[in-house]
């Protein structure tokens, strides 16, 4: 069974750093791209970026380039999303999601399995 | 402001058929597949329709998708109370070189 299990909820202050995680199991972690999606309170879904754990090839949405860093450790089947300096506007639910089909990122690819989400609250 | 446009809400009574629309442009829906997700309150999105009209295993045939030009639709027939959720459309965007989503439609079963 494919599973993406994310780290728990975080409460941080503005200016603090944060790294959240997403551990994949039940499939070949290095064969599928893993993306991150933001959902702000009461709002829709926004694609942030994506990584291929096999070689750490990473792409970012222009809206999030320079704002976050995506990484992965294939030895423990885990992808990460990190911030160096959080803002109150980063308060949101963050989802990781696996992109199918295998190996491929482009037209025709889509998110098929999602993590349970990590709620990040940034408040002074 | 989401790249794909959906109505913010839809409603129907049990047994009815409800249709949710999704409008895009030539760089996304017009030249790529459309996908639909539903999100029950407090849970992660779940894939409902892929490649315009394909259902993953386990999704009932009450759910169907279609696409025409730069628009797409999700139809839910035989509406049930458990269908009450948020529904999102998505598509690859050639300009972004990434996926884009609609703003979501909240479906209420009256």
Image (cartoon, coloured by chain):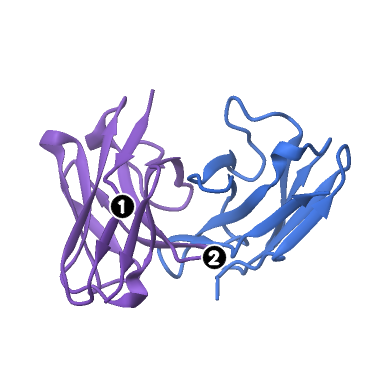
- Looking at the rendered structure, which numbered label has been put on residue A9? 1
- Image quadrant assignment for residue B13: top right
Q: How many marks?
A: 2
Residue B47, by quadrant, is top right
Left or right of B101 on screen, residue A121? left
* Residue A97 disc label: none
Earlier sequence position, callout 1 versus callout 2: 1
Dot 1: few (<14), some (14–19), or many (≥20) neighbours within 10 Å? few
Residue in view at x 26 percent, y 45 percent: A7
Query: Which residue is the extreme one toward the front?
Result: A124
Q: Residue at position x 77%, y 45% from top?
A: B75
Q: Looking at the picture, tell me which residue is in the foreground, A89 or B78.
A: A89
In this rendering, the answer to whether A88 lies above or below A17 is below
Q: Is residue A26 left or right of residue B108?
A: left
State the SS at label 1: loop
Front residue of B97 and A83: A83
Whole-percent x, y for residue B68 in the image: 74, 56
In the rendered image of this protein, does residue B24 appear above or below residue B36? below
Q: CA distance from mark 1 to mark 2?
A: 17 Å
- Which chain is disc 1 placed on? A
Which chain is depicted purple?
A
Residue A42 - label: 2
Q: Could you tell me which secondary element the residue under label 2 belongs to? A: loop
Q: Position of residue A83 (x, y in %)?
A: 20, 67
The chain coloured blue is B
For the N terminus of chain A, the image quarter is top left
């Amino acid at each position: 069974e494919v599973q993406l299990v994310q780290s728990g909820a975080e409460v941080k202050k503005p200016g603090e750093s944060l790294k959240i995680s997403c551990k994949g199991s039940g499939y070949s972690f290095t064969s599928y791209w893993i993306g991150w999606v933001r959902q702000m309170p009461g709002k829709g879904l926004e694609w942030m970026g994506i990584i291929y754990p096999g070689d750490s090839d990473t792409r970012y949405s222009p809206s999030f380039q320079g704002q976050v860093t995506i990484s992965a450790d294939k030895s423990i089947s885990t992808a990460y999303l990190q911030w160096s300096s959080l803002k109150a506007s980063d308060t949101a639910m963050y989802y990781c999601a696996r992109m199918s089909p295998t190996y491929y990122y482009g037209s025709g690819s889509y998110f098929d399995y999602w993590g349970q989400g990590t709620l990040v609250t940034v408040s002074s | 402001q989401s790249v794909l446009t959906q109505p913010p809400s839809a409603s129907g009574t049990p047994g009815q058929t409800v249709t949710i629309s999704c409008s895009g442009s030539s760089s996304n829906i017009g030249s790529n597949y459309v996908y639909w997700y539903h999100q029950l309150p407090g849970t992660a999105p779940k894939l409902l329709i892929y490649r315009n009209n394909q259902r993953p295993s386990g999704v009932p045939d009450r759910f169907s998708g279609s696409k025409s030009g730069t628009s797409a639709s999700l139809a839910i027939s035989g509406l049930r109370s458990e269908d009450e959720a948020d529904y999102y459309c998505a598509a690859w965007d050639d300009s972004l070189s990434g996926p884009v989503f609609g703003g979501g439609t909240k479906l209420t079963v009256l």
